[in-house]
Image (cartoon, rainbow, N blue to C red):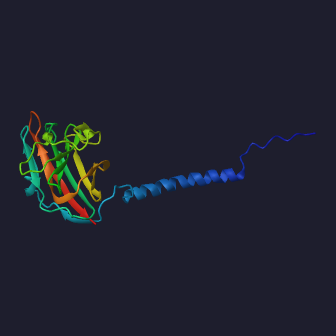
């Protein structure tokens, strides 16, 4: 009796399945790349742009030259919408050679009179502070952090001097504002925005610093 050798070739259905997978994978990757390019992976943003900074006179000028320890506050010329979703987008850059201890941030006024400040430094540190009500502009370090972990802490996505940073504040729900830094989702603050907002800045520890405001825009539903 002659014994036929076993057929070692894969079944035809498996061959077809492998071919389908090989052709489908590049197509799926191309589709995913297209969706990302169209913004499918972007964090949510309110629908309509209602304001964009045309000049920076309200912020002290487009570029600030800061002496060590110098601090300032400014109020934007447009108010946040109340009772609806909004996204506030601000971008700025510490110029090369600036003292890395220099810092800047965005503040929102709350209905209780306090100010919530979202700030970052050229050393790659970030913080969120709640400054108490009052007419006197406070020193940021005198304002408590809403959570202990929101004191100055290193964050790898914060860019150093020479590179721009982007701060976005997005009202996700009534009384809740999400911080995003360079498109990365961070903490959700309990704050009922009252309408006014603005910018905060501070010079470095030992040397001068130059801070350039690059863009600011406000979106609302």
55 up-or-down from 166: above or below: below
In-image side of 71 versus 192 (left or right)? left
Front position in the image: 110 or 95 = 110
Front position in the image: 99 or 114 = 114
Quarter of the picture containing the C terminus is bottom left
86 up-or-down from 185: above or below: below
Give the residue drawn at x 16%, y 40%. 96
Give the residue drawn at x 7%, y 41%. 70
In-image side of 158 versus 77 (left or right)? right
**Based on the displayed image, in which of its 4 quarters is residue 104 positioned?**
top left
Across and down, in percent, residue 211 comes to 13, 46
Most extreme residue toward the front, as rendered? 112
Across and down, in percent, residue 116 comes to 19, 50
In-image side of 87 versus 79 (left or right)? right
Front position in the image: 175 or 118 = 175
Most extreme residue toward the top, as rendered? 206
How many numbered discs?
A: 0
Across and down, in percent, residue 18 comes to 62, 50
Quarter of the picture containing the N terminus is top right
Give the residue drawn at x 67%, y 51%. 15
Most extreme residue toward the right, as rendered? 1
Across and down, in percent, residue 176 comes to 28, 55
């Amino acid at each position: 009796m002659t014994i036929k050798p076993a057929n070692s070739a894969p079944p035809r259905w498996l061959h077809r399945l492998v071919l389908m997978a090989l052709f489908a994978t590049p197509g799926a990757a191309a589709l995913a790349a297209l969706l990302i390019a169209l913004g499918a992976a972007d964090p949510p943003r309110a629908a309509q742009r209602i304001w964009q900074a045309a000049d920076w006179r309200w912020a002290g000028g487009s570029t600030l030259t800061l002496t060590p320890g110098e601090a300032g506050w400014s109020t934007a010329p447009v108010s946040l919408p109340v009772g609806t979703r909004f996204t506030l987008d601000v971008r700025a850059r510490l110029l090369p050679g600036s003292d890395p201890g220099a810092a800047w941030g965005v503040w929102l006024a709350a209905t209780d009179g306090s100010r919530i400040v979202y700030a970052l430094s050229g050393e790659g540190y970030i913080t969120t502070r709640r400054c108490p009500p009052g007419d006197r502009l406070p020193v940021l370090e005198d304002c408590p952090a809403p959570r202990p972990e929101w004191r100055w802490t290193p964050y790898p996505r914060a860019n150093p001097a020479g590179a721009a940073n982007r701060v976005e504040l997005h009202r996700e729900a009534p009384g809740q504002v999400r911080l995003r830094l360079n498109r990365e989702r961070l903490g959700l603050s309990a704050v009922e925005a009252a309408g006014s907002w603005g910018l905060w800045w501070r010079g470095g520890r030992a040397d001068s610093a130059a801070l350039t405001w690059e863009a600011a825009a406000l979106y609302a539903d």
